[in-house]
Every structure is written in structure tokens, then in C-alpha cells.
Image: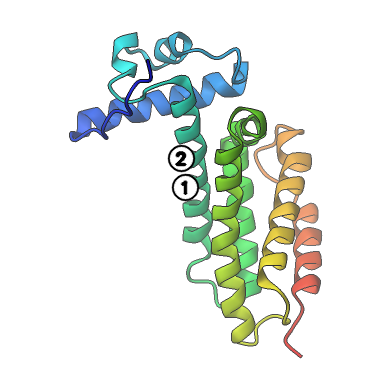
């Protein structure tokens, strides 16, 4: 029998419980992986009864999918907030990349969970990357129209920039278990990005 998806909580207390379950799921999926994780382990980590889980999520699959979406929303908001008042596109890239790397340092589970999604939830994986690319593409299109960067296909540029950020974060944040990227690595990365985006004409 398939469980129906529970409605979103209507009270602040309910939202806090739901958030606690998502935070616990982030930790459990990151440490144990999707297949070894269980609802019991998630509820134990969250400090709630197992029956409480089903008031907010219908299954392990659902909470995993929502966790991917939650991480996606948080990292996109972090980057947007950091770059919103930048005077030009290159500075927006600088601020956005720094914010992404800081988020990676604070939430190393981001990488582990997104990689698990390739097997556990391909649709969530696709949604994660396309949502990031959509915002990137819009910003790059506007910068091209304003003459701030070279003309090109903004979607191609977006995916290239995403790849740079992800690989640099993996090498110099995740693998080193570092709190921040070495300044010289960041400056070389930004110099490469600035050359790649170029100038109109």
C-alpha cells in the first residue's frame, strides 16, 4: 500500500519538527548513504518518535528527495544573497562563488547527498542542477545584454561555471576538510573565470 504524502505543517512547532527531521536526514544520509539509512535512524537522530515521521513524510524516498530540494534552495539563496548588490557580473561571480564555497565548508553533506541522488533519485539530481543553471543563465543573459561580458550561449556558460565551482570546492574544501579555500586558489579561479567571460566586443 502506497502512503499518501502528508500535508505541510500549519504550525510553527510542526515546521520546527519537520526541519529537525530534514537536518537529521542530512546527517544520516551523508554518514551512512541512502541504502544503509533508515527511518528509524533518522527519527533517532532527530529525537522524535517513529510515528511522528509519517506526519511529515511518507517514506525514506520522499524525505531524501525533499532534502535534495532543501539543500538546493539553501545553496541558491546563499549565493543570491551574496551577489544581489554586486556592481557587475564579475563581482557577482566572485561573491557567489565565495558563498558557495562557504556553504560547502559548512555543509559537506551537500556533495555526498547529491552524488547519492544519481542512483537513489535521478529526477532530484536533474532538478538540483537545472534549478541552479536556470538562475545562472538568467543572470548571464542580462550581463551579456548589458555589455558586461562577452556574447555567447548563456546556458553553456552557466554549466561551465557550475562545473568550475563544484570541482574547486571538492578539491580544496571537501577533500581537505577545510573551512575556506586558500586565497591564492580562489584568486586564480576568479582570474580564469574573468578571462573566460571576457568583455563584450
**Could one spot residue 31 in this view of the protein?**
yes
Instruction: Locate the C terminus and report the quarter of the image it occupies.
Output: bottom right
Residue under numbered circle 1: 73
Q: Position of residue 24 (x, y in %)?
A: 45, 22
Q: Is residue 54 above or below residue 112?
A: above
Residue under numbered circle 2: 70
The colour scheme is rainbow
Question: Number of labelled discs?
Answer: 2
Q: From the viewer's perspective, tell me whether residue 52 is left or right of residue 38.
A: left
Q: From the viewer's perspective, tell me whether residue 190 is left or right of residue 17.
A: right
Identify the residue shown where x is 65% and y is 83%. 148
* Identity of the residue furthest to the left in this view: 11
Q: Nearer the viewer, residue 52 or 20?
A: 52
Identify the residue shown where x is 44% and y is 27%. 63
Q: Residues within 10 Å of mark 2 (few under 14, many from 20)?
A: some
Identify the residue shown where x is 51% and y is 52%. 76
Q: Quadrant of residue 23?
A: top left
* Identity of the residue furthest to the front in this view: 1
**Could one spot residue 49 in this view of the protein?**
no
Element on which disc 1 rests: helix
Element on which disc 2 rests: helix
Q: Position of residue 78 (x, y in %)?
A: 50, 52
Q: Residues within 10 Å of mark 1 (few under 14, many from 20)?
A: some
Instruction: Locate the N terminus and report the quarter of the image it occupies.
Output: top left
Identify the residue shown where x is 65% and y is 30%. 112
**Mark 1 to mark 2 CA distance (whole Å):** 5 Å
Mark 1 near mark 2, Cβ–Cβ under 8 Å?
A: yes
Amino acid at each position: 500500500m502506497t502512503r499518501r504524502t502528508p500535508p505541510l505543517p500549519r504550525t510553527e512547532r510542526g515546521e520546527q519538527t519537520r526541519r529537525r527531521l530534514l537536518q537529521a536526514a542530512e546527517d544520516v544520509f551523508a554518514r551512512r548513504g541512502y541504502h544503509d539509512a533508515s527511518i528509524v535512524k533518522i527519527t533517532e537522530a532527530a529525537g522524535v518518535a517513529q510515528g511522528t515521521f509519517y506526519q511529515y513524510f511518507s517514506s525514506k524516498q520522499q524525505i531524501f528527495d525533499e532534502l535534495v530540494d532543501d539543500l538546493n534552495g539553501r545553496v541558491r539563496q546563499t549565493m543570491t544573497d551574496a551577489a544581489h548588490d554586486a556592481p557587475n557580473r564579475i563581482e557577482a561571480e566572485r561573491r557567489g562563488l565565495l558563498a558557495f564555497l562557504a556553504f560547502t565548508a559548512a555543509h559537506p553533506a551537500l556533495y555526498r547527498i547529491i552524488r547519492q541522488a544519481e542512483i537513489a533519485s535521478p529526477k532530484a539530481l536533474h532538478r538540483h542542477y537545472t534549478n541552479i543553471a536556470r538562475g545562472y543563465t538568467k543572470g548571464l543573459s542580462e550581463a551579456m545584454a548589458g555589455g558586461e561580458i562577452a556574447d555567447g550561449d548563456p546556458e553553456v556558460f552557466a554549466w561551465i561555471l557550475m562545473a568550475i565551482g563544484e570541482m574547486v570546492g571538492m578539491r580544496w574544501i571537501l577533500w581537505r576538510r577545510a573551512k575556506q579555500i586558500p586565497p591564492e586558489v580562489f584568486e586564480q579561479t576568479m582570474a580564469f573565470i574573468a578571462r573566460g567571460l571576457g568583455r563584450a566586443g
